[in-house]
Image: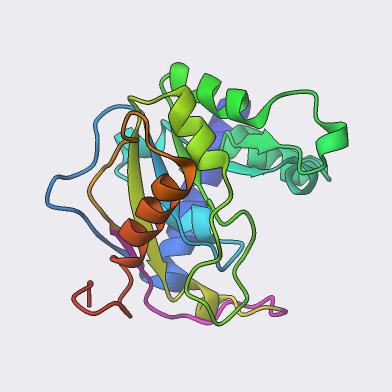
Amino acid sequence: MKALLTKAVATVIVLFARAVTAVRATWSEEGLPSGPCVYYANHSSHGDFVLVWTVLPPRLRHRARPVAGAEYWLKSRLNRFIGRDVFKAVLIARDREKRTEDPVMQMASAIDAGYSLILFPEGTRNQSDERLLPFKSGIFHLAMARPDINLVPVWISNLNRVMPKGEFVPVPLICTVTFGNAMRIIPGEYKDVFLERMQAALLALSPNTTGGPE
């Protein structure tokens, strides 16, 4: 019974996201990796991971888990059901003192189990005028722990206008989710160089970048 409810809620979320945003995906020339990977994206709205999750083909969506804050997704029974059962989120405690698990190992364990991750390296929603906030080091440590994992940049456009800060009723607008070519960490690559390379690949997908997607 719970499995049927979970499937039904997932279907409703996908249909709602598509109805409100008319979201369309732009795929890289290489296509998406068939095995576990890390989709890393810009972060400007609470609904970002929903759009990435929504546009993935069903065979990949069912094996994709967003990385999200435990405090938010465990604060009520409804949140727990959606976070744990529907999205199968990898829940990370933001308060270091309350952590009982290493976040990098949580993510690595999900990858080892055959899942892909949806990750936001900025760590928090970007409410500034900058296109990207500085990346946190988590994606570097994850790549070091699992150097064979593919890292796929994903640029989300317009969702922050669909759900402006402080608003509860979405504004229907067309959103796009653009996937870039997969990359991997280079053996011996320094953290700062790696993070700069990851940011550059993501920014290259932005419609505000000269030569980027329209």
Instruction: Tell which of 62 and 144 is nearer to you.
Output: 144
Residue at point 53% right, 51% down?
Answer: 121
Q: Whole-percent x and y of residue 31?
A: 17, 45
Instruction: Tell which of 121 and 18 is nearer to you.
Output: 121
Q: Whole-percent x and y of residue 117?
A: 46, 37
Residue 169 is covered by the magenta coloring: yes
Q: Whole-percent x and y of residue 164?
A: 61, 80
Q: Is residue 101 above or below residue 95?
A: above
Residue at point 53% right, 52% down?
Answer: 120
Extent of the magenta region: 166-178
Q: Is residue 112 above or below residue 140?
A: above
110 left or right of 197 in image = right
Can residue 55 be seen?
no
94 left or right of 162 in image = right
**Magenta segment, prevailing SS (helix, strand or loop):** loop
Residue at point 62% right, 64% down?
Answer: 125
133 left or right of 36 in image = right
Instruction: Assign the N terminus to one quadrant of the image.
Output: top right
Q: Whole-percent x and y of residue 153?
A: 35, 52
Residue at the farthest left position: 29
Q: Is residue 193 above or below residue 59?
A: below
Can residue 101 be seen?
yes
